[in-house]
Structure formats: C-alpha cells, structure tokens
Image (tube, rainbow, N blue to C red):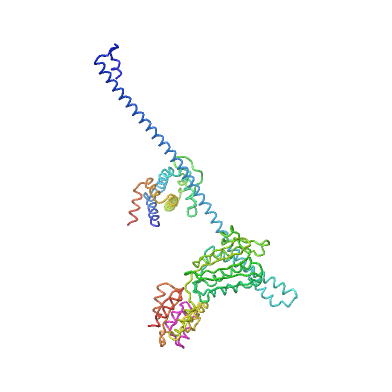
C-alpha cells in the first residue's frame, strides 16, 4: 500500500484515473481506520481480561490465606479443647478421689459422735460440745455426699432406679429432709398441690433430692420467719412444681450460670450460707435425666427466686373419677396379690389399685407370696421377677404345679425386658408380661379386660 | 454419614495397601499428592496444622510417629514420616499409615464437607483409587 501511495503522479492536476485512485485510497484508509479501531477495542478487551485474571488470582491467594488461617485456628481450638477436656477429666478424678478419701475418716467420726451422744451426762460441757460436733459432722457429711454425687454425675456413673411414684410421696420425702433447715430459720412452708394422685416415672430418692435441694437452698437464702411456697399444677402431660421464696434473689447476670457445677449465684458476706455450688447442678442433671427441665426466675437481688421444675407425668387419677366410677367396681373386680420387694413400689401400686376399687394384699418376697397365694383366693397375682429367696418364675411355676384353684391370672411386672425373659415367664405360667416402668392405666386396663372376660 | 465414612476409610486402606511391598513409598506418594492439591486451597500453613493435629491424635496408638522438626521446603514434605517408619514392622507401618490418613481426611471432611473432600481425593489420587474401593465395598 505504501508503494502504491508513492506511485501517485507528482503533478498537481488530477485526472479521471487519479480520482478513481483517490477514492480507492480513501476507502482503504477508511478500512484501515476501522481495522485500527477494532484492534484497539480488542486490546482494551484483552487488557480487561488480564485485569480480571489478575484480580481472580489475587482473590484466590486471599482465599487461600483465609482458609489457611481458618484451618490453623480450628486446629488450635481443637488442641485447646483437648487440653481443657484432659484437665477437666483430671479434676473430676481428683474430686472423686477426694470425696472418697474424706468419707473414709468421716464415717468413724460420725459413729464416735453418736456414741458421745449417749454419755453426755459425763461432763457438763459435753452436751454442748457434742451438739457442735454433731452439727458440723452432719454438715460435712452432706458436703462430701454432694461432692461424691457431683463426681458421679459428671462421670456419668449415676444410675436411676425408675418406678411409678406419686408426686406427693416425693414431696413428702423432700419436705422431711429439708424441714430441719426451715425450722432452724423459723420459716413457714406452704404446699399447694392437687388432691388427686399425680404419677411420675422416676427415681424416688433422686427426685426427692431435687426438691430437698431446692427447699434447702430457699431456706438458706430467705430471711428468718419468712415463707417458702411450693405449688404444683398440671400442664398437658407435664407437672410443674414451683419452689418460690422471697429471699435474697439472684442477679440477672448470674441466672444463666446458676445450674453450672461449682457456681453460686448468691454469696453471703461471711459465706455462712456457703456450700460447694453442687446442689443446683444436681437438680438440673437429675431433672434432665427424667426428661424434664428446670428454670429459675428472679427479678434481681433482694427480690426473691422461683425455681420451676417440669416433669413428664405417667398418669393422674381425678378424685371425682375415682369416687364416681372406681369404688363400686370393688365388688365386681375382686382381689389382687402384689409380690414385689420394693416397698415404695408396693405402696404406690397398692394405693392406686385400691383407688381403682381392688382389694390389695402384698408380699415382699417370693416364698411369702407363694404361701399367701396357696392359702388365699386371688383373682390376680401381680408378681415381680427378681425377688428375694424365690424368683417370680419359680412362684408362677409352683402355683401352676400345685393347681391352685380357682386359677388366678398371673401378671409379671418386671424390669427385665429381653425376649428370653418373657418366653421364660410364659413357660413358667404367667398369663401376661409387663415391663417396668408401666403406666398404672396400662395395668388397670389389662386387669379390667381380663376381669370382664 | 457413617456409610460415607466407612467407604472413605476403605478407600484409604486400599490406596495404602495397593503395593503391599512398598507401603512406605506409597504412603509418602499419597501424602505428596494430597498436599499438592490441598495446599492450593488451605495454604502450606493450613496443611501443616492439619497434619500436625492428625499426628497428635494418633500419638497414643503410634507414639513413634512424630513430627520432630519444623517443615522445610525440601524435595519431600514428609521426611519425618519416612524416618518414623524406619525399622518398624510392615503391619505396624500399614496400620499407622492408614490411621494417620483416615484421621487427616476425616478432619478435612468435617472442615470442608464430604463433596469437596471427595473431589480433592479424586484429583490427588485419581479415580481408580476411589473406584476400586467403591467396588470392593459393594461386594
């Protein structure tokens, strides 16, 4: 193209050919301009791509660095967690060992105190000194027991013995334990609970401990001569038990941690109401193990506290229902023999079945149960399997061998829930097999259906 | 989730034992390839941290498997591992190697998810390792 331009005539006058050539040049120049513009656009586009790629590369580097920091931080946190867990385990082991070691010397001290109590007339100072030692040993025993419980719970070594229990029985036991603490501070306890039985499937001792802990706490942190209130109400299939006081209350910031082990929300100036910060932690653990919850409510320091325990219930029996329907059935349904070695279970079952209109007899071991069954007439025999001196299988077997007439309906009520146990019970002569914990309604329904046949 | 873990563990076992006579070399090769892929995502520091944690978690079962000096940019990132394996019984080497990789990859899966972990393993070790393990698991 340059050559062609150079070949143009040097004269100033343009001929027809020249015009043609000029327009050809103009066209080519235009094409060139267009081509250059396109190339410039392409260069710009490439520049943009390069910029984006650089930006992307930079982003990838930043992401990698962020990932690196995240991984390092996570691994660091895992390491720290492992260290903390190991330290916590060592602490728990130490506490367990400490509690055991403290308990060993405490037992003879407690026994010696008891013996000392029998010779208080040997010296005029002795009654006073005995009183001091007795109170302090009792206090120390309770602290050591709490410590042992704490170590058992945190190591998961606690085992619940579940039975159907009346809430009123649990509360009676809790009040009995905590009454001396209330009496000491001249406090009054009011209890507002429904008259009808509320049944809970739970561990009697542990649940009583829950409410005695709450009551003792309330007594400690409520002024003398004041009142502590227990109220019970049903909400659907749960029972809500409130323990309310007008004591020193709990600061809002302490409330979220009040159930943590070794945490105390309230500190008296001289720590005279001290403790180890275990009681409320045990409350929460035991309640949770029963499928329940516990919460604390307090408007703040000096404004009292309320602890509300929610527990699932197994059944309730309304008083009106019992008086209207169950009592006349007594004549119709007849007599039941309970063979069960757990006295609380016997008591509860007896009370409930009596309310349903049955006549109840009971035996606490297999041999006595068998003897009673042979000497008396029963329509039903509700028998545990694991029994002292003769197990339930043997009781059933002997009864069937002896051909006791009229043959009672034998119901096994046991904690053994394996198929081979049930097969063995059937072979021994049981008609029905119920696994504990069994709702009273289930047992009553079974007995009623058999009675109606 | 348990099935995915089991499959992955099986795959790792197969990968380590693919040449029973050369477990140490295979192990180092697996680690090198894994490191190459993973360092691009979590950086050298992230990889080292994860690797050190895995070693620590296996220190009770295999106390001899240690990271004795800081990572250096040499031909191999895993000279300590090779040194640790020296003089050990081949069964012990295999078990330690499998355990270390399983720990490392399980943590990785928790951190970045199953999908990405599987994708990284495929890129690092190839489809064959995963497929062989999958087939064996089905049988």
Across and down, in percent, residue B16 comes to 39, 50
Q: Is residue A277 above or below residue A165?
A: above
Query: For the view shown, which residue lies furthest in the right direction?
Result: A124
* Residue under the point 42% across and 36% down: A54
Q: What stretch is highlighted in magenta?
A: A369-397
Is any atom of residue B89 visible in this view? no
Horizontally, residue A235 falls left or right of residue A299, namely: left
Image position of A314 with respect to A29: above or below: below
Q: Where is residue A58 in the image (x, y as percent from the top left)?
A: 44, 38
In the image, farthest residue toward the top: A11
Query: Residue A190: which quarter of the image?
Result: bottom right
Q: Is A392 inside the magenta-drawn segment?
A: yes
Which of the 4 image quadrants contains residue B32?
A: top left
Residue A286: % across, % down:
53, 67
Answer with left or right where residue B133 lies relative to residue B83. Answer: left
Nearer to the camera, A362 or B20: A362
| Residue A159 belongs to magenta span | no
How many marks are shown on the rendered structure?
0
């Amino acid at each position: 193209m340059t050559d062609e331009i150079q070949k143009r005539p040097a004269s100033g006058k343009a001929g027809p050919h020249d015009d043609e050539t000029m327009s050809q040049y103009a066209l080519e120049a235009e094409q060139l301009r267009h081509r250059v513009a396109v190339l410039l656009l392409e260069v710009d586009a490439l520049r943009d791509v390069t910029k984006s790629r650089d930006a992307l590369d930079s982003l990838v580097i930043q992401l990698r660095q962020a990932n690196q920091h995240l991984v390092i931080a996570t691994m660091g946190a895992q390491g720290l967690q492992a260290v903390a867990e190991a330290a916590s385990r060592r602490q728990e082991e130490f506490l367990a060992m400490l509690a055991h070691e403290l308990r060993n010397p405490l037992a003879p001290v407690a026994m010696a105190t008891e013996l000392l109590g029998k010779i208080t007339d040997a010296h005029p100072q002795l009654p006073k000194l005995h009183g001091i030692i007795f109170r302090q040993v009792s206090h120390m025993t309770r602290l050591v027991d709490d410590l042992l419980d704490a170590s058992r719970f945190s190591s998961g070594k606690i085992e619940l013995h579940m039975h159907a229990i009346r809430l009123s029985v649990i509360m009676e036991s809790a009040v009995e334990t905590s009454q001396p603490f209330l009496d000491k501070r001249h406090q009054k306890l009011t209890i507002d609970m429904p008259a009808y039985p509320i049944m809970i499937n739970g561990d009697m001792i542990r649940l009583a401990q829950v409410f005695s802990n709450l009551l003792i706490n309330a007594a400690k942190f409520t002024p003398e001569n004041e009142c502590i209130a227990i109220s019970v109400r049903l909400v659907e299939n749960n029972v809500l038990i409130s323990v309310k006081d007008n004591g020193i209350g709990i600061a809002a910031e302490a409330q979220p941690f009040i159930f943590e082990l070794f945490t105390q929300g309230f500190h008296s100036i001289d720590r005279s109401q001290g403790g180890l910060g275990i009681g409320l932690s045990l409350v929460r653990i035991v309640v949770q193990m029963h499928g329940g919850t516990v919460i604390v409510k307090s408007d703040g320091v000096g404004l009292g506290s309320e602890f509300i325990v929610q527990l699932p219930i197994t059944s309730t029996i309304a008083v009106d229902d019992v008086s209207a329907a169950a009592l006349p059935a007594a004549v119709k349904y007849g007599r039941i023999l309970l063979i069960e070695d757990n006295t609380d279970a016997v008591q509860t079952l007896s009370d409930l079945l009596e309310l349903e209109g049955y006549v109840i007899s009971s035996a606490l071991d297999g041999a006595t149960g068998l003897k009673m069954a042979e000497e008396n007439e029963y329509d039903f025999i509700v028998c545990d399997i694991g029994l002292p001196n003769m197990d339930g299988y043997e009781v059933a077997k002997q009864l069937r061998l002896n051909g006791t007439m009229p043959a009672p309906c034998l119901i096994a009520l046991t904690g053994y829930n394996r198929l081979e146990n049930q097969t063995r019970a059937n072979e021994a002569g049981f008609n029905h097999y119920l696994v504990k914990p069994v709702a009273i309604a289930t047992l009553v329904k079974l007995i009623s259906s058999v009675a109606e046949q | 989730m348990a099935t995915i873990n089991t499959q992955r563990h099986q795959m790792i076992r197969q990968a380590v034992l693919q040449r029973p006579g050369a477990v140490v070399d295979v192990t180092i090769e697996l680690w090198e390839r894994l490191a190459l892929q993973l360092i691009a995502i979590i950086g050298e520091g992230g990889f080292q941290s994860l690797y050190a944690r895995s070693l620590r978690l296996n220190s009770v079962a295999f106390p001899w498997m240690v990271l004795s000096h800081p990572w250096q940019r040499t031909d191999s990132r895993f000279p300590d591992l090779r040194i640790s394996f020296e003089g050990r019984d081949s069964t012990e080497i295999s078990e330690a190697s499998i355990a270390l990789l399983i720990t490392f990859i399980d943590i990785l899966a928790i951190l970045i998810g199953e999908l990405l972990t599987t994708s990284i393993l495929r890129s690092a070790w190839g489809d064959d390792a995963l497929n062989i393990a999958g087939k064996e698991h089905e049988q």
